Amino acid sequence: MLNKKTIWALSLLFTQVSYAMFPIPSMPSLPHLPMFGDFNPNKLRAEFNQFVGVEPDFAREQRVVNEIADAVMDGDVEYLPLKNGKEVFSIFMESEADKPKGGVIILHNRGQHANWNDTIKPLRIGLAKTGWHTLSVQMPVLGKQAKYYDYVPIFPYSHARINAAIDFYKKQGITNIVLIAHGCGVHMAMSYVDKYGDGKINGFVGIGMGATDYKQKLVNGFPLYKMTTPILDIYAEQDFSGVRKLANYRGRLIKAANHTKSTQMTVKNADHYYKTPHAAERLTAKVAHWLNTL
């Protein structure tokens, strides 16, 4: 006769196999989206991750790149090839370690860029000092007044950029790759995982996950529950209320994925943009510590 411990082990094994063979279809579902003025955001949900004729502001992106490219002092500018002869601006910084641990890909927040001083630059430089190559990639942009709902239709334009960053590392023989995203960059990273899965990465770090705008609700649930790689969900103590309120929701999704190295962390004395003194350094230290557990 099977004892309780054996039954429990077999049950756990069956659950894990079931998750692998039959991904959870909807866990948990988000509520119906209320009207936002005259706009019905449920249209965004119905068309999520599809190219619907809305394009990023490529001209504004080029102006941003022109402004920051010559100012890059730490690291090297790399133009990653995309399809149709296009390319995307990025900044690569080699690790200072004799034996680098791998490479991280960093996706910036909306309204920021690949060398943003408050969050992105400290991350890409700080993590390079802890043994990781860093590659900060320019994400698609819209006009200055654009909000979360405006950005949702252009999330698919981030997919090719993430793949280009992964290919950049693989061409150098770097296969231990972790995706790190902040704010709207998280939405783009999750859009990528939702469509393609996480088979090309070895870990994911979401900073300030779930940030939207006033009265604009999360359009699509995070696919954290079906990820097989470890997840770090990290947010600021004074982060946006939406980020903090969604922490339990994200926690349930992460728990469903059942990876022992996945966790949630809070950065004290910090806001969403990590502008308070030494906040970005504390963020970098926590991310680096977690990366070293992989």
Image: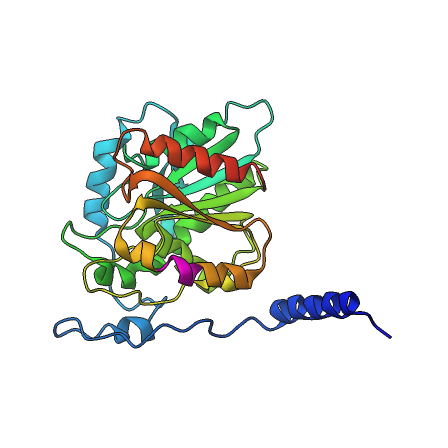
Q: Nearer the viewer, residue 127 or 193?
A: 127
Q: Is residue 257 above or below residue 132?
A: below
The total of numbered circles placed on residues is 0
Residue drawn 32% across the image and 66% down it? 51
Outermost residue on the right side: it is 1
Residue 197 is one of the magenta-drawn residues? no
Query: Magenta stretch: dominant SS?
Result: helix
Is 248 inside the magenta-drawn segment?
A: yes
> Residue 93: x and y, percent?
43, 29
Quarter of the image with the C terminus in it:
top right
**What residue is at 76 percent from the left and 70 percent from the top?**
7
Residue extending furthest front? 4
Please tell me which residue lies in front, 276 or 35: 276
Q: Which residues are magenta?
A: 246-250
Q: Judge whether residue 91 can be spotted in this image.
A: no
Quarter of image, res 19: bottom right
Q: Is residue 177 above or below residue 278?
A: below
Asked whether, in this view, residue 79 is left or right of residue 53, the answer is right
Foreground residue, 91 or 234?
A: 234
**Residue 28 image-quadrant placement:** bottom left
Q: Quadrant of the N terminus?
A: bottom right
Q: Position of residue 263 (x, y in %)?
A: 50, 50
- Asked which quadrant contains residue 284, the reply is top left
Residue appearing at x 48%, y 35% in the figure? 288
x, y percent for residue 122: 35, 31
